[in-house]
Image (cartoon, helix red, strand yellow):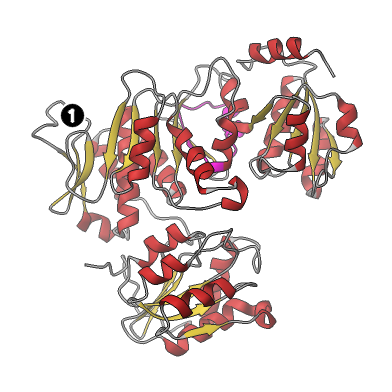
Amino acid sequence: MRDAVGREARLASLTSWHAEWTGLRVAVLGLGSTGFSVADTLVELGAEVLVVTEQADPDRTRLLEVIGARLVVGGADGAPAELEEFGADLVVVSPGYPPHHPLVRWAEDAALPVWGDIELAWRVRDKVGTPAEWLLVTGTNGKTTTVQLTASMLVTAGLRAAPCGNIGVPVLDAVRDPGGFDVFVVELSSHQLHYLARQSTPEPVMPLASVCLNLSDDHLEWHGSAEAYRDAKAGVYTNTRVACVYNRADLATRRMVEEAEVVEGARAIGFGLDVPGPSDLGIVDGILCDRAFLEDRASSALELTTIDALAARGLAAPHVVANILAASALVRAVGVTPEQIRDTLEVFSLDHHRIETVAVVDGITWVDDSKATNAHAADASLSAYRSVVWIVGGLLKGIDIAGLVEKHAARVRAAVVIGEDRTAVLAAFERHASHVPVIEVSPAETGDVMLRAVEAASGVAAAGDTVLLAPAAASMDQFTDYAERGRLFAAAVDDLVGGEADERPTTPPTTD
């Protein structure tokens, strides 16, 4: 192992793409899209790279050979011999590796610096000239929609903006794009924020603006506790320079801002579905308003758009409106005008599998919200409808679903429970909503689980109901991912009612 003092001094000097990275020995944990982007970047910088992964995708394996990185498959039980012998100066860990993973613990026991991909991206962000500004987005629910909205608003304003991070495009890929960007809108998972909190660079990540949209227990099996999950999310505000955007309806996000170490002069900007105060964005008589980014905010407001205009685009569900307000706050901090925000919203559409109406037949609306992979997201989705046949279940990730069942017991007419382990979901209905008919799709039917679920829902749904796929759980027990789960739902609905669909509404029926 190299001299620790010398290693520390060298790593401290690596704060630019143009620094001396040549010969640095880096162990990269993971070979997903993030892990490969890390390896590819480091090889381009001139580092010696050893990738360690428990599963190696054949295509990425071949690409590693092409770029000149080494690969070791293993690590589930500890450091492979090749890793021990490599003599790493640095370990860069992919977000999927929790802090209790044997390889992460090995690195800590060996006193090796551990970075995440976000720290590396910040250090080398100057590859193609003047570095882009960063806007950071996190939260239990709504991150991707908010990132897409924010990036679209920036593009409408004439800025070169890249949605990246946990949204699917690694930040390092955006940094290395030869065209360059003015702004990165970076979606950060709690996993990435956990490792970002440990950053050791003398020039830490300093976003122009940041937001935690909401907070509800999630990924507890990864973080180990609700407190650790909350602390990771709170890190999004650290070193923010202009605007810390928080959710007025979620006290936890306000406390995060109050406790954050920010750059002097950074403002707290609230958003919510109620009437905004000075330094807030909100709603007055059906009009989305900005009372934060104008001189006379004590007695005036700027109109952004209206609920009626959003309804015409299918964007009027309460949690979507909240995301729009959060995105508007971020881009107003950059200088985007209300007119440019309004122009964006006139053409913006939600992503697939996010409160997506797939059919309306005989007065029954079929909605795909497969992306509701946790209780918080499912709560927002359920709240948008008055009478629901709920398709629920999957991998709960250590979350207790009982509170969600109890909260919505009055609006759920029936439940169709899927998932390999349905025990917790069934118990929640038995305890908190015993009056609700529950139909269980058993493991023996998992080959066509969604077809069975749709058939079951069709048997109990009536005119005025919404059959809602909002599983409140991850999908990997029975599906490849949430997108496959949503596609199979839509296909099953089409098989069942294809050719009979009524005209689809542009917005879901919202509660009073």
Q: Position of residue 130 (x, y in %)?
A: 50, 17
In which quadrant will I find the C terminus? Answer: bottom left
Q: Residue furthest left?
A: 299
Q: Residue furthest bottom?
A: 459
Q: Position of residue 175 (x, y in %)?
A: 57, 28
The kind of residue on which mark 1 rests is Leu
The image quarter in which residue 474 lies:
bottom right
Please tell me whether residue 262 is drawn above or below residue 436 in the rendered image.
Answer: above
Q: Is residue 162 left or right of residue 21?
A: left
**Tag 1, which secondary structure?**
loop
Q: Position of residue 1 (x, y in %)?
A: 85, 19
Label 1 CA crowd tier, 10 Å (few <14, some 14–19, many 20+)? some
Residue appearing at x 60%, y 38% in the figure: 170
Identify which residue, 302 or 427, lies in the foreground: 427
The question of residue 184 being in magenta is answered with yes
Q: Is residue 301 left or right of residue 428?
A: left
Residue 190 can be seen in this image:
yes
How many labels were placed on the picture?
1
Please tell me whether residue 299 is drawn above or below residue 33 in the rendered image.
Answer: above
Please tell me whether residue 469 is drawn above or below residue 438 in the rendered image.
Answer: above
The image quarter in which residue 34 lies:
top right
Q: Is residue 450 left or right of residue 231?
A: right
The stretch in magenta equals 169-190
Q: Position of residue 66 (x, y in %)?
A: 82, 34
Residue appearing at x 29%, y 49% in the figure: 249
Identify which residue, 386 or 303, lies in the foreground: 386
Residue 189 can be seen in this image:
no
The question of residue 386 being in magenta is answered with no
Q: Which residue is mark 1?
A: 294
The image quarter in which residue 14 lies:
top right
